[in-house]
Each structure stands twice: as C-alpha cells, then as structure tokens.
Image (cartoon, rainbow, N blue to C red):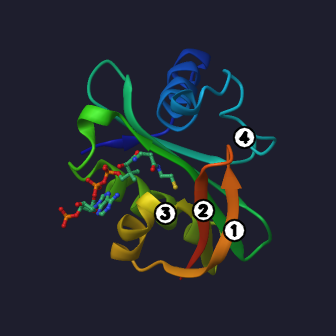
Amino acid sequence: MTITQPQTPEEFEKYYDLRWRILRKPWNQPKGSEKDNKEEKAIHVMVCEKDRIPVGVGRAHFNSAEEAQVRFMAVEKNMQGKGIGAALLKELEKKSKEKGAKYIILNARDSAIPFYEKYGYKVVKQSHTLFNSVVHFEMKKEL
Ligand SMILES: CC(C)(COP(=O)(O)OP(=O)(O)OC[C@H]1O[C@@H](n2cnc3c(N)ncnc32)[C@H](O)[C@@H]1OP(=O)(O)O)[C@@H](O)C(=O)NCCC(=O)NCCS
C-alpha cells in the first residue's frame, strides 16, 4: 500500500471531497465544513487506488511543539476494513514524531474508538458532541 501526500490543487480537491463525503455529508453538512483553519500547516496523507484518486485520507497538526493531533481520518466506504486506516494512522504518527511530537491526541467518534485502541490510543475523557448526535472521546498516545 502506497501512502503519499496530495500535491496539486486537483489532488487537494479530491482529498477534501473524500473527507466531506465520509465525515460531513451523512450529517447534511455543507461543502467547506470539512476544513478548519489549520490546513495550510498540517500534514496531509492519502492512500490512492489508481490515478492518484484517494480512497483514504488523514491529517495531523501541531497544538504545541510536543502535542500533535490527528483529525479527519476517512476511508471510502467500500474500502474500509482493508488496512488503509491503519496505514494512514501509522504514517501520521511517523511524520509527527519526525517533527518533534512527543504524543498524539485525537477526538474519536465512539464508533471509531476500538480502531484507535488497537493502535495504542487510550480514552482520556468524553469531549464534544458533533451535529447534536456524534459523541466524541479524547484519546491519547505517547510516541
Ligand atoms: C475509522 C476508519 C478511519 C478506519 O479505517 P479502516 O481502513 O476501515 O480500518 P483498517 O482496515 O485499517 O482497520 C485496522 C484494524 O482496526 C479494526 N477496525 C477498524 N475500524 C474499526 C471499528 N470501527 N471498530 C472496531 N474495529 C475496527 C479493523 O477490523 C482492523 O483490525 P484487524 O487488523 O484485526 O483486521 C474508517 O473505517 C472510516 O473512515 N470510518 C468512517 C469515518 C470515521 O469514523 N472516521 C474516524 C473519525 S474519528
């Protein structure tokens, strides 16, 4: 499985579109809601099937010199359960560590908690509830 980073505006468009379709559209959230104000400095990774069309995406940004945060992990529905999410997560951890992160935090939807637990993340506390329905839990992993 090859992990790359989106480079061109066209690749970024497809990258954000996958994020939106998996993480925002099911809750009727508009295009644009899949981005925050940390995109420019963040680490973006993707797995592509062919023609550099992403089937899995993920992002990490720094909250401080030591604290990196993983956000916006999304795998195409018919490609879930094939190891893509795990590969993306490991790559984000590697790149964050290379840039000096000592630990990673993330806010997981309750449905994704077992996935992150599998890779060493532990629930710290319940965090926010998105769109009045998606309960999230803060998780942490020392690198
Ligand atoms: C959560 C998500 C990113 C995981 O990616 P994925 O490619 O489906 O996961 P993988 O195939 O790499 O899974 C790796 C392992 O975790 C397990 N796993 C994955 N998702 C799981 C889940 N929701 N519950 C329990 N186990 C899970 C897999 O069974 C696999 O275990 P195995 O190696 O023993 O077979 C992906 O399913 C997804 O995009 N889900 C919808 C959006 C979402 O919830 N994003 C996270 C927001 S916090």
Q: Is mark 3 within 8 Å of ligand 1?
A: no
Q: Is disc 4's CB within 8 Å of ligand 1?
A: no
Separation of residues labelled 1 and 4 (CA atoms) = 22 Å
Task: Decide which of tag 1 and tag 3 comes sooner along the chain.
Answer: 3
Q: Position of residue 97 (x, y in %)?
A: 56, 71
Dots 1 and 4: beta carbons under 8 Å? no
Q: Nearer the viewer, residue 92 or 81?
A: 81
The structure residue drawn at horizontal position 50% and vertical position 21%, both measured from the top left corner, is 14
Amino acid at pointer 3:
Asp
Q: Which residue is mark 3?
A: 110
Whether label 3 touches label 2, CB < 8 Å: yes
Question: Cβ–Cβ below 8 Å for labels 1 and 2?
Answer: yes
Callout 2 amino acid? His
State the image quarter where residue 53 is shown.
top left
Q: Residues within 10 Å of mark 4 (few under 14, many from 20)?
A: few
The residue drawn where x is 61% and y is 79% is 103
- The residue where tag 1 is placed is 127
141 or 24: nearer the eye? 24
**Residue 54, image x, y percentages:** 39, 29
Expressed as whole percent of the image width and height from the top left, the position of residue 85 reads: 36, 52
> Which callout, 4 or 2, points to the residue nearer the camera?
2
First along the sequence among labels 4 and 2: 4
Of the numbered discs 1 and 4, the one sitting upstream in the chain is 4
Viewer-proximal residue, 94 or 139? 139
- Disc 2 CB within 8 Å of nearest ligand 1 atom: yes
The vertical placement of 8 against 71, above or below, is above
Which of disc 2 and disc 3 is earlier in sequence?
Answer: 3
Residue 44 position, x and y percent, is 57, 44
State the CA–CA distance, disc 4 to disc 3.
Answer: 24 Å
In this view, the mark in front (4 or 3): 3
Q: Which mark is residue 136?
A: 2
From what the image shows, is residue 79 above or below residue 136? above
